[in-house]
Amino acid sequence: MPNNGDVEILPSLWLSYQYLPPHLKRCFAYCSLFPHDYEFDKEELILLWRAENLLAIQKGQRPEEVGEDNFNDLVARSLFRRTPDSVYVMHDLVSDLAKFVSAEFFLSWDEYNSNTSKSKARHLFLGNKKVDSKALSQAKYLRTLLAPDWGIESSLLSVAQSLRVLSLPEYPYPGLPDSIGDLKHLRYLNLSSSQIESLPDTVCNLHNLQILLLSWCELLTRLPNKIGSLINLLLLDVTRTPLEDMPEDLYKLKSLQFLPEFVVGKNNGSSINQLQELLHLHGRIRISGLENIVVVGDIAETILKDLKFVTELILEWNGRSENSDLELERVALERLLPHTDLRILKIDGYRGTRFVDWLGDSSFSNVTSIRLEGCRRCRLLPPLGQLPSLEKLKISGFDELERIGDEFFCSSTSSKIVPFRSLKELAIVGMRIWKEWSLTRACGEAGVLPSLTSLQIWNCERLVSLLFGEPQQLTHTPFPSLETIFVSNCPMLETFLEWGSFSRLQSIDIWGCQMLFPLRRRWDLQRFTSLTSLELGGCYDSLVGSFPEEGLLPTTLTSLSIIDFKYLKSLNGRSLQQLTSLERLSIINCEKLRCLPEERLPPSLSFLRIHGCPVLGRRCQRENGEDWHKIDHITRVEIRDIIDKNGGKRDGRSKKRKAAEKAVPKARMRNLVRGGKINYIHVDGVMEIIWCSDFVC
C-alpha cells in the first residue's frame, strides 16, 4: 500500500481515489493545500477550482454549476463530511490521501520550508505562520498563494510572476504594493475582511483577473476609477464594504456575472444606469443608496428588466430622511421593475406612501420570498396574495399602517384567486399602530392562508385581534395548516386562536402579551390535538400566583417553558401530573417561585431547566437540596442562578444557535459590535444572540 512518510494510506481510500474520474482527481488533489481540520466553505472552494481551471466545463454549462456538481460528488463519496454547523471537513486520513496524491506540488509552509526542492512548489498555504520572505525567493513558479492574515511584500511579487491565485483574507495593512499590477496571470484576488483602505491603480492592469473579493473591508470606501479595464472580471464582491459610490466605468465590465452589491453614490444618482449594460449578472444583487436618486432623470426606465439571470433583488433606501419627494420615490420604484422570473425580493426603507402596480402583480409567478421592511410611510400593503408561488413573507417597520384589509389579499379584479395559496411562513414585526386585519371577500373552498405553517408576530403594540373580522362572519378557518405560532410584545392583543380546530398546530410561543394572558381559559388549548410545545413568557399579572390551572394544558405536551412570571409563587402539581407525555420543563426568571409542588413531577420528564430562580434553584441542588427528592428521577437537571437581563424579551431569530467560532467571522463581529444594538449575547460553547435590532446577515 502507498504511504505518505510515516502515514500509510488505507487500501479502501486508495481504491476510492483510483475510481475517481480525472476531473474529480484534480479537484480532490487541490484540497491537499489545506491543513487537517480545515473547515471548507463550498462557494470559496469552487471559486478556487474555477480560477485554477480545474473544472471540466462543457459547452452550455455554467462553471458554478459544474463546480457544485464536483463538490457534491466528493461529498457523496464521503471525501468531505458535512458538520452540524453546515461547514465541510475532511477526515485526517482523507486529507493524508490528498497530500499523498498531490506529491510535492501542493505544500503547507512547514512542508515547503523543509522541502529541498522548493522550486517544484506550485501551490502554497501559509496559514497564520510567520514567514521569512527570503525563504520564498525560490518560489518563482508558484501558481497559488493562500495567506490569510498575512502581509505581502513587493519582493515576493517580483519573484512569483506566475501566480494565478492570491488569497489574503484579513490582510492587516492599509495598502498593497503597486507591483501587484505586474501579476499578469492573476485570476483570483481575495482581500475580504481586510484592513485595506485603498487599492492601487495598478490593480486595473490585471487584465486576466476573473474574481475580486473585497467583502467586509470596513475601511475601503472607493474602488479604482479604471476598474472597467478588468475586461475578464466575472465576480466583484463588495458585500458589506462601505463604498461611497461605484466607479463610473463599471459598465465596461461586460463579462461580469456576479455583483452582489451596487451602491448609488451621493450627487451621482444616475450611476445606477450602468446596470443596464451588465446583462450577464446572475444570482443576487443588492442596490443601496437609492435615496441618492434626487431627480426623475437620474434613473432610466426599466433599467433592471433586462437582467434576466438575476434571481434575488434587494432595493434599499436610507429611510431616515423625512424630506423625500413622494412622487420621485414612487417613480424610482416604478422604474426598478425587475423581470418576471425573479425568485426573491426585498424592499427596505422605501419612503413613498403607496407601492407601485408591479409589486404583487400575478405575472411574477415565480417569486417565492418577499421582505418589505422599514417602509415607514406606507399606509396600504400591495396585493401580495396574488403571487401564486410566494412561500415566505416578512413585513416590518410600517409606522403608518393601521389596518390590513382586502387589498393585501388580492386586487378588486382578482376575486377568483385563492389568496396566498402557497404561503408557508409569515412574519409581521414592529408595526406601531397596526390594530387589525380583516377580509370581507370570499376565499373559496381553500380558506384563508391555506398553506401557512408558521406565523410570527412581534412588537405590534396596538394589535387587538388575530381574527380576520368577527368569528360569526368567518366561513372558513384561517390558517388550517398552521404548525407553529410565535407572538411577542403585543400588549393590547385580546383574541388569540379562539376559533377553529387547528389540528396541525404543534408549537405555541407567547411572550409579553399582557391583555391576552388573563384570558387564557378562552384559548381552549385542549382543541389542539397535535400541540407538543408551549412556551409562555413575560407574565406580570399579580393574580397569577400559581400555574398552570387544572385542565388548561393539553396532555399532548412534550415541552413546557414558563418564563418571566413575575408573581408566580407555586406550581400546580396536580395539573402538571396530568401532562403524561411531558419530557422537557423549563422554568426561567421566576424569582418568587419558592419550591416545587409536593406531587412529584411527571415520570415522563427527562429534562428540567431552572434558570434565574434563586430560591428554587438552591432547593433543587443535587443531593442536599430540600426539593432534590422530587426531581431525582429526572435524567438531566440544569440549574443556574443567572437572570437573563433581557427580561425574557425575544424575537423569532433567537431560536437558532450556532457554534460561536462559526457564527460571524472576525471582521463581521467587529462591524456588529460597533454598529449593532445588542442587548444580550451568551457564549457557552455556542452563541445565542437575543434581541439584536440591527443585526445583518
Image (cartoon, rainbow, N blue to C red):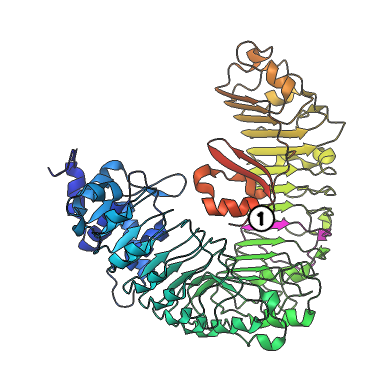
Disc 1 crowd, CA 10 A, few/some/many (<14, 14-19, 20+): few
**Residue at 51% of width from left, 85% of height from top?**
277
Taking the image as shown, residue 13 lies to the left or right of residue 494, namely left
Closer-to-camera residue (387/74):
74
Q: In the image as oriented, which residue stretches furthest toward the right?
A: 543
Split into 4 quadrants, where in the image is the C terminus? bottom right
Q: Secondary structure at mark 1?
A: helix
The answer to whether residue 482 is seen in the rendering is: no
Magenta-drawn segment: 423-446
Q: Position of residue 491 (x, y in %)?
A: 83, 47
Does residue 627 sit above or below 6 in this rendering? above
The answer to whether residue 349 is seen in the rendering is: yes
50 falls in the magenta region? no
Closer-to-camera residue (488/389):
488
Taking the image as shown, residue 127 lies to the left or right of residue 464, namely left
Secondary structure mostly seen in the magenta stretch = loop
442 falls in the magenta region? yes
Taking the image as shown, residue 56 lies to the left or right of residue 390, namely left
Q: Name the residue beneath numbered marker 1.
A: 675
Find residue 207 and report its image quarter.
Answer: bottom left
**Residue at 76% of width from left, 60% of height from top?**
475
Find residue 621 and report its image quarter.
Answer: top right
Does residue 507 sit above or below 410 in this rendering? above
Find residue 585 and report its image quarter.
Answer: top right
Q: Position of residue 32 (x, y in %)?
A: 28, 52
Q: Amino acid at mark 1?
A: Gly
Does residue 208 sit above or below 27 in this rendering? below
Q: Position of residue 674 (x, y in %)?
A: 65, 53
